[in-house]
Image: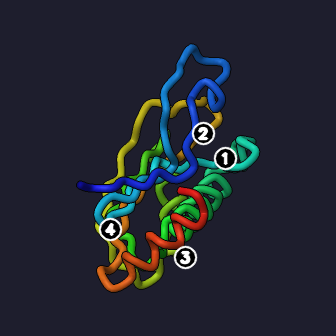
């Protein structure tokens, strides 16, 4: 039987009170050594406050900080990222966002897809970044034990 650890579970009724939604989600799911992250935006995961409103580079910085934090909580690391998808609300945001990502992911050599979309879940959000990482086989038991201790 496959065990899926869910990290930072929440309901969208709490996250998006202005919308008539009630979906049970998680910020990260670990399944068979693969870490799947929910798309990260310029939002503090603890307070749900938007960060960097009007500043795409600041939003990308917070999204990358969230990714690093969620990977750590999952037992993974930035250098174990294998795939990133970037959603931009304006093609002109590409350079500041990718420069920010480049600082966080220097030397990682992941695969990436970039998309320009008409909007994200909230109008103040300008960029969303989701990532997939793989925990090496030799660290999976240790990572699972850490998640168990943390209550994942």
Vertical arrangement, residue 37 with respect to residue 110, above or below: above
Q: Quadrant of residue 137?
A: bottom left
Quickly name the residue at label 1: 43
Quarter of the picture holding the N terminus: bottom left
| Callout 1 secondary element | loop
| Callout 2 secondary element | loop
Which dot, 4 or 1, sits closer to the camera?
A: 4
Label ID, residue 82: none
Mark 2 / mark 3, whichever is N-terminal: 3
Using the numbered discs, state the Cα–Cα distance from disc 1 to disc 3 in whole angstroms.
19 Å
Q: Are marks 1 and 2 in contact (CB under 8 Å)?
A: yes
Residue 18 % position (x, y): 66, 18
Q: Are marks 4 and 2 in contact (CB under 8 Å)?
A: no
| Callout 3 secondary element | helix
Mark 4 / mark 3, whichever is N-terminal: 4
Mark 4 / mark 2, whichever is N-terminal: 4
Quickly name the residue at label 4: 33
Vertical arrangement, residue 95 with respect to residue 91, above or below: below
Vertical arrangement, residue 26 with respect to residue 124, above or below: below
Which dot, 1 or 2, sits closer to the camera?
A: 1
In depth, the one of 105 and 77 nearer the eye is: 77
Quickly name the residue at label 2: 125
Q: Are marks 4 and 1 in contact (CB under 8 Å)?
A: no
Using the numbered discs, state the Cα–Cα distance from disc 1 to disc 2 in whole angstroms.
9 Å
In depth, the one of 112 and 83 nearer the eye is: 83
Count neighbours of disc 1 (C-alpha within 10 A) and say few if under 14, some if 14 to 19, many if 20 or more: some
Quickly name the residue at label 3: 103
Count neighbours of disc 3 (C-alpha within 10 A) and say few if under 14, some if 14 to 19, many if 20 or more: few
Relative placement, left or right, of 102 versus 124 is left
Residue 71 % position (x, y): 50, 66
């Amino acid at each position: 039987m496959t065990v899926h650890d869910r990290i930072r579970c929440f309901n969208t009724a709490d996250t998006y009170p202005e919308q008539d939604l009630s979906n049970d989600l998680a910020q990260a799911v670990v399944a068979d050594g693969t870490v799947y992250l929910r798309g990260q935006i310029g939002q503090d995961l603890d307070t749900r406050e938007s960060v960097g409103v009007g500043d795409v580079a600041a939003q990308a910085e917070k999204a990358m900080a969230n990714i690093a934090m969620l990977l750590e909580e999952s037992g993974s690391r930035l250098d174990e990222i294998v795939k990133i998808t970037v959603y931009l609300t304006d093609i002109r945001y590409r350079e500041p966002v990718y420069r920010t990502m480049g600082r966080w992911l220097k030397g990682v050599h992941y695969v990436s897809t970039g998309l320009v979309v008409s909007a994200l879940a909230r109008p103040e959000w300008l960029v969303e970044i989701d990532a997939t990482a793989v925990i090496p086989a030799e660290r999976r038991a240790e990572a699972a034990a850490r998640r168990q201790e943390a209550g994942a």
